[in-house]
Every structure is written in C-alpha cells, then in structure tokens.
Amino acid sequence: MERILVATDLTAQGARAVRRAAMLAEALGAELEILHVLRDDLPADLRIEFERVAGGRLAADVGALRLRLEDRVRSRLEFGTPWMAILDAASDADLLVMGAHRHAGIADLFRGTTVERVAKACDTPLLVVRGDPVTPYASLLAATDFSLAARAALEEALRLAPNAATCLLHAYGVPFRFLLGGESRRSLLQAERQRQRKAAERDMETFLGGLEARLADAEHAFVDDTPEAAIRTALARAPAGLLAVGTHARPRLSEALLGSVARGLMADPPCDLLAVPPPFRTTG
C-alpha cells in the first residue's frame, strides 16, 4: 500500500479517522494525505476566515504526525462539493478513510450524506472509522457471500489487520421457510438447512483458495439468517475491531451501487467498517 487518503470534517469523529489512518500509514509504510473540503459557495469573507482556520487545523495535524511519519504526511485543503472533491482526491489512493456518520442509528439521516455519496461511487476501498483507535486491529469479522467483492474485501482487511483473530461469516437463507410448518415440513426445513450448510462449507474452501495457510486458525461461521442480521448478531456476541464487506459496486452513476447490506451497516456501523468494491465494475 503506497497512499492513504483520510477525509476529515475537523470534528471529533474526523479526528478519530485521522488517528486510525496515521496508525495504518505507519504500520504499512504508506504516505498519508489529510484532506478537508470547504464548500465553494461560501461568502468571500467567510471563505477567507474558514480557509485560515481549517488550514491551521490541518497544519497542526500534520505537525503532530511528523515524528511518526516524517515526510510521508501532508495536508490538502480543497473548495467544492465535499463528496465530489473526496472522490476526485481518492482516485489515485489505495485506501480512503472517513469518520462514521454522526447520526448513527438513524438510517434516514444517512441517505444523501457525504459518506454515503462517496461510498456509492468510490472505486477505492473505504474504511469508515467508528471506534477510538488505540491499538492495531486485534479482531476481524469478514462477511462473505463468496463473491469477488467479498474476496477483495477479505484480502484488503488482511493487509490492514495482519495479526487480527479472524472470523469468516457466511449467512444463508432457506427459501420459503415461513411456509413450512408441521412436523413433516419441519424435517424438510432441517434437511434444507443441512444441505445449504454443506454447500457453503464447500464454497468456503474454494473462496479461500491461496489463503488457507494464512487463515488456518480462522473461525468459520455459517448462519441461517439475513446477512445484516447475522453480522450484527455475531458482533453482539463477539465484538470485533474491524468488519469487512464487499460492496458489489455498479457503474458510477447507478443509484443501486451501494449494496443493501453495506448501506444498512454503514448507516449505523457496529464497529470500524471496511467496504471494498470488486476488482472490476459490471455494466448492468
């Protein structure tokens, strides 16, 4: 990893994102750029004052990190529409880091925010920081549907958390389960669960091709539930520092680009969330 971009709104949550990004840059030997975007429709007098204050805050952040990162840290102040400016700046970054939404838990307020708009169109792995970074990630939950996006998310997470205890989670659902009742139908339901679990175990072996040695001690969890519910239940039982998911990205202008699972999690992230698009974009 060569370049990490962290976008901060200069709030406390933005400061957490900067600290996590700096920790990762130090561990990975990467360059760190700290970005703040001021709206370009500010009145002239406010623009001058905001630029002075924001520039001073960014300079202070860079100065505080010089001892750790030397000349590998710099700041950048842009004027424009925040989510568009962040996307432009992230186009040549290996990782984009942002703070979690400040209205966590209220999904309606998440829609249309800078984080969601960036996530919907971002070609770069996006790390949304919720927790206060104190130590490197010690635990990782990687949710997988065995897709290319999930594999890309797992590989990226292992770069960011190389020493973390890892749990690989796959959620599956039995079709028409709520139509099955009675003893005979209950046995059919159990048989279908067993069939899907065995199929998932085989798919997991294929999914991990080339990573078997690296993940020899990883826990494998197969859960009969919806993906988001399975993830939140798993994290409630065993909290993790980092959650990795694939985003199943579609073309830049698609309103459906951010998958429903990633969208729900990002609206109220239970922990730091790494959202990674597949290695290529589809056209439909």
Image: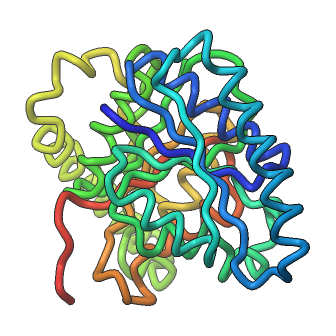
Quick one: 58 or 255, which is closer to the camera?
Answer: 58
Quick one: 29 or 124, which is closer to the camera?
Answer: 29
Instruction: Give how far across and how far down residue 86 sits, in percent.
Output: 52, 63
Horizontal side of 277 relative to 142 (left or right) equals: left
In the figure, residue 49 lies in which quadrant?
A: bottom right
Q: Which residue is drawn at 61% across and 10% down?
A: 67
**Residue 238 shows in this picture:** no
Quick one: 131 or 178, which is closer to the camera?
Answer: 131
The colour scheme applied to this rendered structure is: rainbow
* Residue 273, above or below 191: above
* Residue 200, above or below 68: below
Horizontal side of 168 relative to 59 (left or right) equals: left
Quick one: 218 or 92, which is closer to the camera?
Answer: 92
Instruction: Give how far across and how far down residue 193 sits, in percent.
Output: 34, 58
In the figure, residue 266 lies in which quadrant?
A: bottom right
* Residue 253, above or below 140: below
In the figure, residue 187 lies in which quadrant?
A: bottom left
* Residue 79, above or below 150: below
Q: Which residue is drawn at 76% across and 39% down?
A: 15
Q: How many numbered marks are there?
A: 0
Instruction: Give how far across and how far down residue 181 sits, in percent.
Output: 50, 78
**Residue 223 shows in this picture:** yes
User: Quadrant of the image for the N terminus?
Assistant: top left
Horizontal side of 92 relative to 55 (left or right) equals: left
Instruction: Give how far across and how far down residue 252 sits, in percent.
Output: 34, 81
Q: Residue at x 16, y 48 (%)?
A: 203
Q: Which residue lies furthest to the top in this view?
A: 67
User: Quadrant of the image for the C terminus?
Assistant: bottom left
